[in-house]
Each structure stands twice: as structure tokens, then as C-alpha cells.
Amino acid sequence: MPMTTTSTLPSPVQQSFNAKLLSVPTPNFIFNLAALKRKMPANGGNTLRQRRYNQLNAALVPLGNAGVTPPAQQLTAVDIDAKISFYGTFIQLNEQVN
């Protein structure tokens, strides 16, 4: 009687199905690691404005006992607008997928 081995079986018979699903590969979104999360007020529009002050110049006048007052610097600000965009998708399943 001939011996049946796995190399002589057809490929559908050699396969077995594991009911545990593999994890879904997701992209590594590194651009949102340093993001600041802010809540928008209700009916507040879709643009968020934030303000940042520019860096001051280096102090070149030493402070000592002479009573010298260093020159004043102007504080300048920059407004940064962030516009909200909405994204979404859906999936459609039938009764055969469980």
C-alpha cells in the first residue's frame, strides 16, 4: 500500500484555517506625536487661532553694580491658524462574514 505524505496531498488539503485573525497593519503616523490636542467650542467655526511670541535677542549688556539699565526689547507675536478637516470612511459587510 502506498504511503501518503504531505507532499502528495493537494494544496487545499494541506492548508488549515486559523480562526484567530491577524492584526491589521496600520501606518506609523509620526507627524501627530508632537501634536497639541485642543477642543473646539461648540459653533466656534473650523479654524483655531493660537499665538506664539518670538524669541528675544541675546542680552549683550552685563548686569552689575553700576546701575546700568539694559535696553528694552520689543516683544513680537505670531498668530498661527489651524484649519480643521474632517475625514471618514465606512465598510460594508454581508451576512457571510462573521
Image: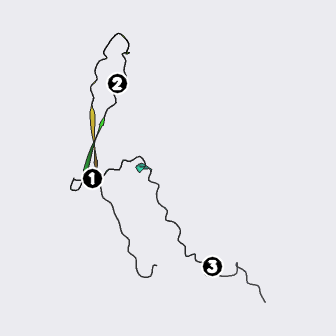
Label of residue 57 in the image:
2
Q: Position of residue 82 (x, y in %)?
A: 29, 47
The residue that label 3 is drawn on is: 11
Q: Disc 3 versus disc 2: distance between alpha carbons?
A: 73 Å
Q: Mark 3: few, some, or many residues within 10 Å (few <14, many ≥20)? A: few
Question: Could you tell me which secondary element the residue under label 2 belongs to?
Answer: loop
The reply to whether discs 1 and 3 touch (Cβ–Cβ < 8 Å) is no
Question: Could you tell me which secondary element the residue under label 3 belongs to?
Answer: helix
Query: Which residue occupies 44% across, 82% down?
Result: 96
Q: Mark 2: few, some, or many residues within 10 Å (few <14, many ≥20)? A: few
The reply to whether discs 3 and 2 touch (Cβ–Cβ < 8 Å) is no
Mark 2 or mark 1: whose residue is earlier in sequence: 1
Q: Disc 1 versus disc 3: distance between alpha carbons?
A: 57 Å
Q: Position of residue 69 (x, y in %)?
A: 30, 15
- Front residue of this view, candidates 90 and 14: 90
The residue that label 1 is drawn on is: 40
Query: Which residue occupies 29% across, 55% down?
Result: 85
Q: Disc 2 versus disc 1: distance between alpha carbons?
A: 34 Å
The reply to whether discs 2 and 1 touch (Cβ–Cβ < 8 Å) is no
Question: In the image, what residue type sits under mark 3?
Answer: Ser
Residue 2, picture quadrant: bottom right
Question: In the image, what residue type sits under mark 2?
Answer: Asn
